[in-house]
Image: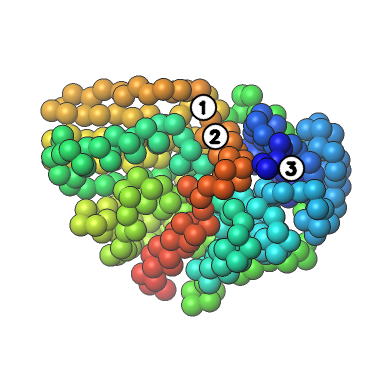
Amino acid sequence: MKKKFINIGFIGAGMIGQVGHISCYQKTVGCRLSALAELRPELGEKVAKQKNIRKLYKTHFQLIQDPAIDAVIVVTKRPTTGPVVLDALNAGKHVLSEKPMAHSVEQAQLLVTKAQQKNLKYSIGFMKRHDPGVIFAKKILEQARLDLRWGELVSIHCYSHGGNFAPHCQKGLDYIMTEENRPEGINSWKIAPNWLDKSLHDEYASFLNVFSHDLNLIRYLAGTKPEVLSASFCKKNYGVVLDSDGVKTTLEFSEKESTNWNEGVTFTFKNATLAIQLAAPLDKNKTAKIILTIAGKSQNIAYTNQNKCWAFQNQASAFIEDIRHNRVPITSGADSLCDLFMAEKIWRFYKT
């Protein structure tokens, strides 16, 4: 007999934890906000009160020992994500964690293996896969490649020059912050694979945190496990060339201060171009835009629920349904492990 409610525990109550996760599960049918673990006492108390979360724990160790909790959402400092997830899986809890799931293939494989051994749902927060525009674009791409309506697919180009997304999402955000510092001494894992020169660890971790979204998305849309052919690095500007089952795929990433959000994927066919322009992550009022260009004429492709369904909200609903109906998450840990393989191959091209 299926449980009427999935009891959710939240580990971490920072801005993303509140806005991108706790607030979304508040609106999700079939779950109950049952517990919160937050190392900052004042913040934990305020968030638990505002969100009407019944139980407040000082540490994630206490929360995962609560037998009433079915699943946990982990939004902690990135180096602590892996060990916290491992603790939760060992305790028998389904897990959704923010990306990146870990900082090396070795670390990520440990988590995936544990989830499989325990027969638990383990999902990663690649919410872009839950954007209605991305989902609709994937259907168009699959059909176009099947019926060759625009000829053969010639190339794929993914770009991310996102900059600061805060100006895109100030309106309507509801979260609490305090002056408390995050405690030190929490169990952390290395922020880079063992083989990478230590001088590059911080930059690698930043790359993975920002651009793993795009590595994950290109695999989802292209429907392949691309092979890394080459990569170039220049002052936090990155260029990567992939082979996606015979289709040349280029990635262009940079970190900048601009407030102009500029991220997307372009698919060039022999006789048309399909472009997907992504919305800023915390912009609740926008979804991905799809633009089709044929013979120099462009048109926006409309789809159901455009500008209504926020990717973060859809992600929360999907995780609950994955648990209730024993589905494999579309952002499963096992699938997301591929992103770590790609990231490590890319960084092997770094010339120190």
Q: Distance of mark 3 from mark 1, alpha carbons?
A: 24 Å
Q: Is residue 39 visible?
A: no
CB atoms of marks 1 and 2 within 8 Å: yes
Query: Residue 339 appears at what percent x and percent y?
Result: 44, 59
Residue 151, position as x, y percentages in the image = 13, 40
Which of the two labelled residues, at mark 3 and mark 1, occupies the earlier sequence position? 3
Circle 2: residue type: Asn
Reading the image, the residue beneath label 1 is 309
Q: Nearer the viewer, residue 246 or 16?
A: 246
Quadrant housing residue 7: top right
Q: Looking at the picture, tell me which residue is in the foreground, 70 or 264.
A: 70
Q: Name the residue tied to disc 2.
A: 314
Q: Nearer the viewer, mark 2 or mark 3?
A: 3
Q: Quadrant of the N terminus?
A: top right
Precedes in sequence: disc 1 or disc 2: 1
Model colouring: rainbow
Q: Is 223 on the left or on the right of 7, as rendered?
A: left
Quarter of the image where the C terminus is located: bottom left
Residue at numbered disc 3: 7
Q: Earlier in the sequence, mark 2 or mark 3?
A: 3
